[in-house]
Image (cartoon, coloured by chain):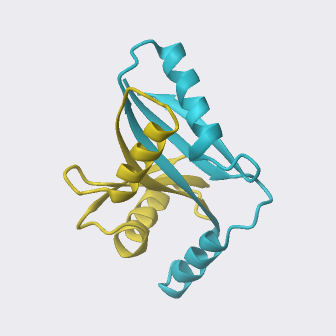
Chain colours: A yellow, B cyan
Amino acid sequence: MQARVTVTLKTGILDPQGKAIEGALASLGFSGVGSVRQGKVFDIALEETDPARAKAQLDAMCEKLLANTVIESYRVELV
Amino acid sequence: MQARVTVTLKTGILDPQGKAIEGALASLGFSGVGSVRQGKVFDIALEETDPARAKAQLDAMCEKLLANTVIESYRVELV
């Protein structure tokens, strides 16, 4: 079973990397860019075939390793 | 208009970061993890309201800045 986990900064958390990209886009001549926020994506192949158990396993992985839940939120999708 | 750009390594490109995560998950006791690939996600707010023009602008941003198209592929979604 293939899964995609998306980890993004929570609203209100400062994102210096996103700000740097905003600046770089402006200096490349892209106008009309409001804001940029950067996050991470993990494509994970699991042997588990039961969707509910796979989801539970992925949630545990996010809590323990993939996301810093103090400042980041995560979303798990099975594909 | 809000857009999400996902940048992932092309198939066959070595992903040391993904390999490190695989190792970390195994050492945390998660079994049955086949492979992990890490990518990036950008949430971009655009002033452009026409979907076709927004898409064209985002493609240009990816080609010029957000993705290294030699080793990475990108996907643009308007949300």
User: In this orientation, which residue lies closer to the viewer: B26 or A23?
Assistant: A23
Q: In this picture, is B31 found above or below B59?
A: below
Residue A10 lies in quadrant: bottom left
Which residue is the extreme one toward the left? A12
Q: In this picture, is B60 found above or below A1?
A: above
Q: Can you see residue A6?
A: no
Q: Residue at x 59, y 75 (%)?
A: B22
Q: In this picture, is A47 found above or below A39?
A: below
Task: State left or right for residue B64 relative to residue A14.
Answer: right
Residue A23 screen position, x and y as percent = 40, 45
Residue B20 lies in quadrant: bottom right
The N terminus of chain A, quarter of image: bottom right
Q: In this picture, is B36 found above or below B75?
A: below
Residue B46 screen position, x and y as percent = 38, 27
Residue A51 screen position, x and y as percent = 50, 52
Residue A24 screen position, x and y as percent = 47, 46
Q: Can you see residue B41?
A: yes
The C terminus of chain A, quarter of image: top right
Which residue is the extreme one toward the right? B12
Q: Residue at x 50, y 84 (%)?
A: B29
User: In this orientation, which residue lies closer to the viewer: A7 or A12?
Assistant: A12
Q: Residue at x 55, y 75 (%)?
A: B21
Q: Residue at x 73, y 52 (%)?
A: B10
Count of numbered marks: 0
